Image (spheres, coloured by chain):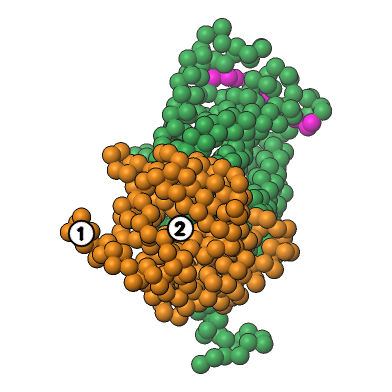
Chain colours: A green, B orange
Amino acid sequence: MEKPVTRDPGFYVMVAIGLAVMFAAPLMLDLFTIMQITQYVVLSVFALSLGYIWGFGGILSFGQAAFFGLGAYTFAVASINMGSTTIPMVLAFIIPTIFGVLLGYFMFYGRLSDVYLGVVTLVVALIFWKLINHTAGPEYSIGSARLGGFNGIPSIPTLHIPGDPTAWLDPGQMFQVFMGFLIVIYIALRFLIASDFGRVSIGIRENETRASLLGYDVRKQKVVVFAIGGGIAGIAGAMWATYQAFIDPNSVSMEMSAKALVWVMAGGVGTLVGPIIGCILLQWLTLQLGTVDVVNSIAVLGAIMMILVLALPRGIVPTVRSLMLGGYFLWKRNHGTTIPGKAVKE
Amino acid sequence: MNDILTTRGLTMRFGGVTAVDNVDFNLRDGELRCLLGPNGAGKSTFFKCLTGQLTPTEGNVTFAGQDLTGAHTHRIVNLGVGIKTQVPNVFDGITAYENVRLSARRKHLKPLARELTMTTLERCGITHLARREVGLLSHGQRQLVELAMVLAGEPKLILLDEPAAGMTGDERDRLAQLVLESARSAAVVVVEHDMAFIRQIAKFVTVFNRGAIFREAMIDDIMQDREVQEIYLGKQANAA
């Protein structure tokens, strides 16, 4: 934990894997597969947003999709009105962040306990969902963008090169740009977590009372963490909107919030790689199971979740990590002599 | 007139129960004071009113000339109060070093915070535990880590709630040393049950009973006091 990010080999390995996928995948895979995995990239960013606030701020949000949807709708409305996607992408970060500050202010300064925090976030997402579902009529439009209610917003512009709205990205380029987003957000979060701000957040996660007994304003800290998570979820929403060229209230649904929770839980709370791996693995499984007609895919998925929770209660990444560490020490003990400069101790 | 901490008419009620009843308390700058009293005497409630964990029903708390009544804990701490709670409040998932550093970093830039962390760990005799995860340490060791966190904040007033609980004899001796040492640079209030520990550190003592101050005297007089012995042995019902 106290090791700086720049001296953690795992960090470089992850970034290298990310960059390799970013550059190699469009060369090696067909268009259809690229579009499929783009989806995983977008959802991984969403998973990271919850993985950060839950794992490194101790904030368990049951309505993370509210921010995802807010970002998606912000991007859709802004890009349709402006005919460009650059500023809407920025807005998709700023507006959910501001919303996170407001909601966080009421929750944390109101000293809500964890359970009520879960309830409030859940209800906020539900209200969003209800609200957007009721905007089907033509009177619900912002500028030239009709909100469309349960029909959603179609024809959302594809991402283009900043400054040139005619230079649309093709699916391969879009994949690379999104991979870039994911890598940059991962790096930024790693550094944020290792900073003094991040350490205080971890302290608050570990023991809120002690953090305030050291003179840290727990409420303020939590609002900031929550808002950053909201902003990242907003970016994921915008990526989702432009990737699909379409957005509907499903993006704010309970299912969306629940999925994020499951990804983070399966991958491992308290890691950043975990949520990404959990997301990719479970989304891929869902997709595979959907192609099989023999069994009900949701039942199988449910069973897999249960097994995961029972067998790997800490999540995939922490379990694999400790297995690898354990294996390394075992190997070191058995092959002590093969490590140069290290004497064997009997 | 150099009182660092005073309370006037401090009262805390929970429903019909008055846990702290109209307490006037004075602590001089640099003084070491022990608070004694049987279970349920209101020591811990009084303590929590001082630390901002509870907002008193009536009365006020003044620290170094500033009114602290109902202030948030973090504000009280930032004014120079170091607090150790009854149940050890430490960061279990991270190392002892990180725990103490979080406290030192509050007021100091990185290099100084690192230095202060190391010297404080050494002062508390837990340098060898620096890299260990605090959740895996013994109760007494955790208490020392928490004390190190309090000291690393360089407080003007130190409030300790049952610091010796769960400690071995050696750890307790070290703790007594530390408390006496800290009392040279700060005022200290210790709430404690452990009489062996009290004898090691106490000079002037305040005895609580039924939410009010029962006696204030030097420790030797308190030990001789028949009435104090009686409330500790639960004989006050007969005496009244």
Name the outermost residue toward the left.
B238
Secondary element type, mark 2: loop
Residue flagged by tag 2: what amino acid is it? Answer: Thr
Q: Main secondary structure of the magenta part?
A: loop
Q: Earlier in the sequence, mark 2 or mark 1?
A: 2
Residue B205 vertical position relative to residue A285 in the rendered view, above or below: below
Frontmost of labels 2 and 1 is 1
User: What chain letter is assigned to the residue under label 1?
Assistant: B
- Whether residue A92 is visible to the viewer of this picture, yes or no, is no
Task: Tell me if I can see residue A90 in this picture.
Answer: yes
Residue at mark 2 to residue at mark 1: CA–CA distance: 34 Å
- The verdict on residue A161 being magenta is yes
Residue A105: percent from the left, percent from the top?
55, 33
Confirm whether the magenta stretch covers residue A191.
Answer: no
Secondary element at tag 1: helix
- Taking the spot 58% from the left edge, 63% from the top edge, the residue there is B30
Q: Name the spot of residue B31 as percent of width and height, x first.
A: 55, 63
Mark 2, residue position: B85
Q: Quadrant of residue B113?
A: bottom right
Say what amino acid the circle numbered 1 marks.
Answer: Ala
Q: Residue at x 40, y 72 (%)?
A: B220
Q: In this image, A196 relative to A299: left or right?
A: right
Looking at the figure, which quarter contains the N terminus of chain A? bottom right
Quick check: B129 above or below B46?
below
Q: Residue at x 54, y 72 (%)?
A: B180
Q: Residue at x 56, y 85 (%)?
A: A335
Highlighted magenta segment, given as a residue range: A152-162
